[in-house]
Amino acid sequence: MAVILLTGASGSIGQMLRQRLGHHELRLTDVRAGNGVEALDVTHAAAVERACRGADAIVHLGGIAGEGPFEDVLDVNVRGTERVLQAAHDAGVPRVVLASSNHAAGLYERGDAGPAGLADDVPPRPDSYYGWSKAAMEALGRLYHDRYGIHVSCLRIGSCAEEPENPRDLSAWLSPGDAARLVEAALTATGWRLVWGVSANTRRWWSEEGGRAIGYRPRDDAERWAAKVGEPDLSAPEHRLVGGTMPESPLGGPT
Ligand SMILES: NC(=O)c1ccc[n+]([C@@H]2O[C@H](COP(=O)([O-])OP(=O)(O)OC[C@H]3O[C@@H](n4cnc5c(N)ncnc54)[C@H](O)[C@@H]3O)[C@@H](O)[C@H]2O)c1
């Protein structure tokens, strides 16, 4: 059992994880407090440092989870992540799991994938300010690993929901159970890593290698919902690109 600080614990993935990681001692925090979640704004350095003391690991989910104005994603996602990593260093927390996103690499196409799928560690190719902020988070994680030896796993999460909701999810879905399995694996990983966060989907086209290397064994497959969500039109950009419809949305605007 480890002491784990969870940021963004009131959010969608935070709620999925708190139900499934209860065998650890969880410190649940979010800017939206309540229901067992303590108030913590990740942009407040001193408060983050206090929250980190005595923790074995941080799972950093808190932030803006979609496209937004540049200044907002810079402030919350990038500055907030710097505060989390610096606090980990100051408080001696050895391991940080960062919620990155497929949108950090959203402009890669199916044609860029080799036989083993699109590599987990393709260089960033953001499709939005949001995706850019996730790429910046990944790079900050690398900096804190290289300078201070903190183990940092950056999870390039696909589409995490209770069930697949649209044809894109047939390849990009991450089930709640697999999200917990992925975070568990990342909590034992060493070094600095980029790992796709998707389930064992039949139509997955992002590599399994990064996950396999840290002991992630996904169990769920979106294919069960194929009849319900409908077939993707693979000639449409939203099914050809990693980032789905995000690359067609206005920069900084609502998605
Ligand atoms: N859900 C997905 O499919 C998906 C896909 C890719 C990446 N991600 C990433 O995973 C993380 C969690 O996603 P989610 O779907 O649960 O999003 P969410 O919006 O449901 O939850 C994010 C949480 O962060 C909190 N938050 C916002 N600003 C904060 C701040 N300054 N300090 C502390 N907390 C703050 C919000 O209150 C919210 O509860 C996000 O970082 C998101 O970018 C999610």
Image: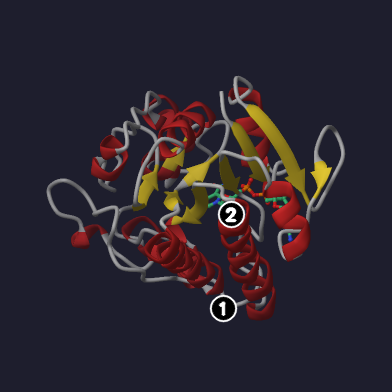
From the top left corner, tell me how far across and down residue 207 is, in percent: 25, 46
Q: Secondary structure at mark 1?
A: loop
Does residue 232 show up? no
The kind of residue tagged 1 is Leu
Mark 2 lies on residue: 88
Q: Which residue is nearer to you in this view: 187 or 174?
A: 187
Question: Which of 196/238 is in front?
Answer: 196
Residue type, mark 2 in image: Ala
| Place of residue 61 in the rendered image (x, y in percent of width and height, measured from the top left) | 61, 49
Mark before the other along the chain sequence, 1 or 2: 2
Name the residue at 48% across, 70% down: 136
Give x and y (percent) for residue 160: 53, 41
Q: Which mark is residue 251?
A: 1
Whether residue 19 is visible, yes or no, is: yes
Q: Is residue 28 above or below residue 125?
A: above
Of 191 and 102, which appears nearest the observer? Answer: 191
Left or right of 87? Residue 238 is left
Mark 2 element type: helix
| Residue drawn at x 49%, y 56% as measured from the top left | 100
Residue at the image position 50 percent from the left and 65 percent from the top:
137
Distance in Å between CA atoms under marks 1 and 2: 32 Å
In front of the other: label 1 or label 2?
Answer: 2
- The quadrant holding residue 219 is top left
Q: Which residue shows up at 21% across the image and 49% down it?
A: 117
Q: Which residue is situated farthest in the left direction here? A: 115
Mark 1 lies within 8 Å of ligand 1 (Cβ measured): no
- Toward which corner of the image does residue 149 lie, by quadrant? bottom left
